[in-house]
Structure formats: C-alpha cells, structure tokens
Image (cartoon, coloured by chain):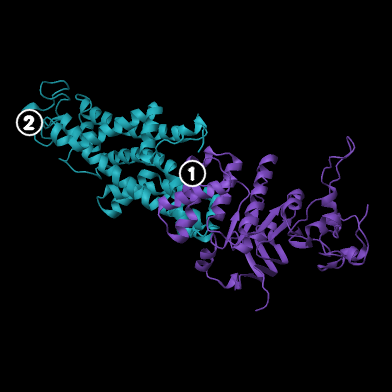
Amino acid sequence: MSNAPAIVAAEGPIRRRPVALLELARKNRGVLVGLALVAVLFLVALLAPVISPHDPIATEPDNAYLPPLSPGHALGTDELGRDQISRILWGARISLPVAFVAVAVGLVAGGLIGLISGYAGGLTDLLLMRVIDALLAFPALILAIALVAALGPSLRIAIGIVAIPAYARLVRAVVLQLKQMEFVVATRSLGATPVRIVLRHLIPNLMNPVLVQVSLSAGFAILAEAVLSFLGLGAQPPTPDWGQMITTGRTFLPNDPWLAIIPGVAISITVYSFNLLGDSLRDALDPRLRR
Amino acid sequence: MAFSHLLELENVHTELSLAEGTLRAVDGVSLTIDAGETLGIVGESGSGKSMTALSIMRLLPRSGRIVEGSIRFKDRVLSDLSEDEMEAIRGTEMAMIFQDPMTSLNPVYRTGWQVGEPLRIHRHVGSGEAIATATDLFRQVGIPDAKSRVRHFPHMLSGGMRQRAMIAMGLSMSPSLLIADEPTTALDVTIQAQILDLLRRLNREYGTATILITHNLGVVAGMCDRVIVMYAGRIVEQGRTEDVFSHPEHPYTWSLLRSIPRLDAEPHEPLTPIEGSPPDMVHLPAGCKFQPRCPFAVARCSREEPSLLQVRDQLARCWVTQAGTELNG
C-alpha cells in the first residue's frame, strides 16, 4: 500500500516486556552488572547443596580457626571447625528467600494501599496515609524488632511490613500523577469501569517505578535480616546465617577477624548487587535521562 | 409521539465545591441537539463549557455535582441511570474527545490496542479483531499507513495523528453523539484545519451529532449549524451561526467578535481586547454577570439579571438588546 521505505522498518515484530528488560541491560552497563550479580546470587542459593565443598553444620574440632586459603577450606573454618565457604553459600539460602517474601509482602500490601489511596482520594486516602505515617514514625529496624517480638520469629513478614510505606507512598504518588492525565477521563468516557481503569490502564504505568523499588527494597530486606539475626532475632545456631555468623565471629575479632569479616563481605556484596540494579534501573528508566 | 431531541438539557445547574467556596460552574443551561446536527459552545476559560460537557457524560470531577435540572438523551433521563447503565452508554452512544492529545492516550499501550479498547469493553471482541477494526478506523480518520501505525506507541505519533487516533477511538462504536472538547486547541493551525475537516466529514457521512466546544470563534464559524455563547456558567446568546456572527445580540459576543485580529486591519492598529477580566466565579456580581465589563451597560444591568429571550433571530440575555437597542461602537 505504501512505498515509503521508513515504514518498512516499523513492521518489525512486536517487542514484549520481559525482552525490554534485557534490552535495557544491553544498553546500560549498571543494569547489566546488577542483573548478573543478582542472578549469580540466586544461582548460589539454588545450587548451595551442590557447590558447597563441605556440610555447613558438620563440626571438625581438630580443624578449628583455620585461616582463609587453608588447604581444603578456601575461606578457613570457624571456632567449631565448620567450613566457612560452605556456610556462606548456604547462608544465601536464608537471606534471599527472606528478601523475596519481604518484597512480596511490601509490594502487595503497600501497592494495594497506594492504589486505593491514590485512586479513591478523599477520606479513604486521608485514613490510609495516616496509617502509613504511623508505620513511618518508627525507625525501620526498631519497628522490625518490635514486630518480631509481636509476631514471633517470622522475620520475613516483619521486614515486609516495614517495607510497606515505601511502596504505598510510591504507588500513591504515581497514581495521583497519572490521574491528572487526560487518558484516565478519556478511557472513562469510552465506558471503562473504574476497576478496569486501575487494573488495565494504571497498573501497567506503575511497572517502571515499582521495579526500581523492588530492587532497592530487596537490598534493604537482606540488610535488615542480617541485622536482626545479628541481634539474635533471626535464624538460630547452627543454621548458617550471615548476620548470626557475624555475632559469633565478633567474639574472635582480635585474633581471627576473618570469622566476622567474611560474612560481612557476603552481606555487602548482596546488598550492593540489589542496590546497583535498582539505581541503574532508575537511571535507565528515567525518561528525562533517556537519549 | 411528540418530536424529541437527541439530547436535551433543561435548566442544568452544576456546582463545584472548591477550597475557596462553592461555585456554580453551570448555571441554568438549557440546550438541545438533534441527530446529525453540529452545535458549537463558545466561551473563555472557566465559562462552564467543559463542565457542561462533563455533566452530560456524567464524568464530573469528584468536587462536581449536578444540583438541578435534567439531561435527557434518547428519551432516557441520564441522572436516573445507574453508574453501570451510564458506563454502557459511554463510548457506545456518546463519546468524547479531549483537548490534549499528548496525555489522552495511555503511554504504555500501542495506539491500535487503545483504539480497540471500546470494542473490548462493550463487545468483548478478541484482540485480533480489535486490532483489525482499529486499523480500519485509522484509515477512516485519515491516518496514513494504518497497518503499521496501529503498532506504534503514542509517543511515536505526532499531535495531529494522536488526535486522529482519539477521534477513531471515540467513533469506534458509531455513537450518535460526539462531544469534542477543544479538539484543536493543542494543535497548530494547519493540523487544526485537517482535524475540523475530519470532524465535519464524519458528521456528514455518519450523521453523528457533534458538540464542538471551543474558545475559537473561527472554528465555530466554519463548522457549526448553531452556536451557544457561554459566560460565567450561563448561556448568554444562542442561535444559528450566521445570525449570531452577522448581528450579535449580546455585548459579550459582540466584543468577542470585535477582538478577533483582522487581516485587513491597518498596520500597527492595536487589537481590541475585552476590558476587565473574567469574573470571579465564587463572588459573582449582582445583576448581569457581564455588566462590569460591558460598554453598553445601563443602570438596570447591575440590579437585575436578564433572562435569555428572543432578540431578532436568536436568543440573548441582555437588557439593552431586549429593549431594541442595536449594538454599535
């Protein structure tokens, strides 16, 4: 029908969303590295039983306090002679699921509150936001400790609840902004119900900012889990947990500092990976910075 | 059965509750439109023209409320309908086009998908059929290379193209009434003309009654059978377009027509703006609402508000012309 050559290029296959994420990774090095690091972390957690050289809770009292780079124990052993690298690898199996569940709780509950608050407005908005303010009034970790005390040793839920305000406020802010756009009224003028507008027209527009928040709050969740375990509120010995490994290692800092340093490095790398991914995604998705 | 209009507004009052107080955005508007007709509603910002349109669609903002009057559409009283029944009418029997084509389309969806949205909502068609219909509609509204344009995201289209897509969306269910709220304001002049041409053509070909809301008198002159001039939420003049343009009977219309820049003016001849500023809708003056800015005002104007009465060939809300005086100056 048309003979304009420029149009032919536009006839390419329709690109789907997941591919768009890989596309971003290809263009933005931060996204690429962050995504790769996070993928490696998940692989480690998944494959820990396969790639660990030793049983993480098997004690070898004869081989206690081996320094890193000892034969057979690449990162040394702890005060009971347990292999450090195996404990670190298994520790990922504790930390990542906590992050996963905490993010899910924060995202679903916070997202729902933000959507309702932003779209309904008025008194509903006022009440919901005061609840969120109440949550925000406590420092995040104090609130998490209080929640653990109240809910029992269910760290993931407690950390998830702490993450709710960030999601609720983010989603509400974006919804308020979207509501100003004429397409919302325009879609209503076509006969769309409010539910359809929220589900099919607003939520897809929320994906980008929420994706950024998911990466950032996963980093926060891992750090919070480590802190709570460090304080003795998380996994109990002999479970290999990074935060709890630091607690034990603390006692031996003067003579055998690696016992505390190694899990600390593991936590840092994990948190850094998620934050790098989140920050780079934010930059890559920011339309103002897009070329 | 007696002759009935497609749409009939009778003494409609719409209130907006704002922080500054409650204001009557629409104050006693009565109007009719018949099948196939084009009606222009003219007025400056805040004169109540958009609020009239949103009252008809029942899409008022949360702060807005119709407090009095009735709106009849095809023998149904719209205020009696439930929200579900109203949703069934929107998009199928009446549709609306908005001012800003930049934000009227959802940025995350392909234009074809969106233009097919009314079909999915009302006829529950599959996505393939919706896209096919959207392609067809794109052709009808003059979007070149419709087949590939339906796959484009809104940001890939120009403003005029997006407005065409909006029109396509509004027309997808062949409504009998189309309300176009300043459809050309955000577009540049050549594109404006194309969009108006398109609206006129669709009006002729499909007999879609069209309400064109604008602050541009030229747009009305070229396109509408009848025109309504609004000021401070009221209709101040109403009549056939040629009557209103050739001999305005309300000083506001008269001033509006005089303030249009003319091509045949002397070089450096100053423009003639309307003196004063639009009224504060929360604290309206007593009497005629235009009286503080009116060059013809007499003592009675600040005491009593005139009604909308027959003056020559049209209706006007003015003591001066109702008394037989001609507007000159």
Q: CA distance from mark 1 to mark 2?
A: 71 Å
The answer to which of B245 and A131 lies nearer the viewer is B245
The answer to which of A37 and B89 lies nearer the viewer is B89
Which SS class for mark 2?
helix
Q: Which chain is cyan?
A: A
Q: Is residue B326 left or right of residue A233?
A: right
Q: Nearer the viewer, mark 1 or mark 2?
A: 1
Name the residue type under label 2.
Pro
Point out residue B279 in the picture as x, y percentages from the top left corner: 78, 55
Can you see residue B57? Answer: yes
A33 over B157 or under it: above or below: above
Residue with the mark numbered 1: B150
Point out residue A146 in the picture as x, y percentages from the top left corner: 33, 50
Residue with the mark numbered 2: A61
- Residue at mark 2: chain: A
A55 over B87 or under it: above or below: above
Q: Is residue A159 left or right of residue A247?
A: right
Q: Which chain is purple?
A: B
Which SS class for mark 1?
loop
Point out residue B237 in the picture as x, y percentages from the top left corner: 80, 61
Can you see residue B275? Answer: no
Name the residue type under label 1.
Val
